[in-house]
Amino acid sequence: MFVFGNTTYIFPTMLFKYKDLNNQEQSIELPITVDKFIAIKTKVNGLELLSMQYYWVFWEIRDALFKRLMFDCHKQELTTFLKQLQTNDFDFKEHYQDAIVKAVDIYYNVYYWDSVFVAGEPSTTIFEDGILGGQGRLELHLDFDTEALEHLLVQLLEAFGIIGIEEYQEEDALATSELSADGLFEDLVSECWLSIKEQTKSKVIGILFQATGCGSMSDLDTGENVDESTEGMTAYLKRKGAL
């Protein structure tokens, strides 16, 4: 079984053997069957990467491996962070010590090539600025390195029999902008949020959004998109009983 985003692959997956950066043999599960791999290789063997008829399969595998190797390794850290948000574990100023947080804002930003920044605080739609004291909002920094994945992907292309991959090998880095990395990270946050809620039984509403304001805002419990305006947020939280 292989889980990628909201999709669970229940068919037998393929175990792919490769050499890591230290030239040690490793193996990793791919979201593809052996029969499918062989069928594709038969058709694309000897083709240039850009003319590869089934190029989308490679990119889908790349995205799945990126989430697994770069993001999923941070599940425990992210889960602990989200548990703090769900259990009201904030450092409030004295005036707000008895505050009951019914909704939290969760911001994230994928810094392409090497890290993700995540922050959480009581909903700014409900609480005025300055509710938190001490260290203020909760923050999390998750680092990743794409070099090992790039090394693995080159070997995967070679296993498919693709030629002319020198240009791919010479790229400075695997640009996360090509991977829809924001969507992959949102999948992980949603997965961890719902998982920890089964333990905490918390009623806190989590609103997730991209810190630069480029993406949409969504409710982590329902997946609903939330209007990004102040009026939209207020109406949504009222409908959910948080206001």
Image (cartoon, helix red, strand yellow):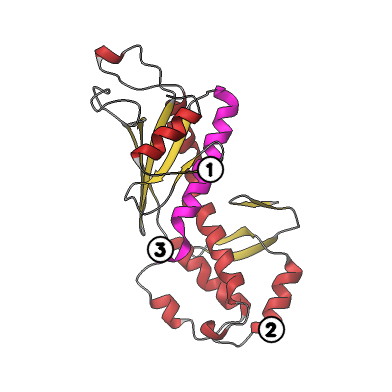
Range of magenta residues: 174-201
Q: Main secondary structure of the magenta part?
A: helix
Q: Residue at x 45, y 28 (%)?
A: 238
Q: Can you identify the residue that label 2 sits on? A: 43
Instruction: Decide whether residue 193 is among the magenta residues.
Output: yes
Q: Residues within 10 Å of mark 1 (few under 14, many from 20)?
A: few
**In the figure, 81 relative to 64: above or below?**
above
Q: CA distance from mark 1 to mark 3?
A: 24 Å
Q: Can you identify the residue that label 3 sits on? A: 177
Q: Which one is earlier in the sequence, the residue at label 2 or at label 1?
A: 2
The front one of 236 and 205 is 236
Amino acid type at circle 1 is Glu
Instruction: Decide whether residue 24 is among the magenta residues.
Output: no
**In the figure, 109 relative to 75: above or below?**
below
Q: Quadrant of residue 231?
A: top left
Q: Quadrant of residue 146?
A: bottom left
Amino acid type at circle 2 is Lys
How many numbered marks, from 0 up? Answer: 3
Amino acid type at circle 3 is Ser
Q: Is residue 23 left or right of residue 210?
A: right
Give the image location of residue 145, x and y in percent: 40, 56
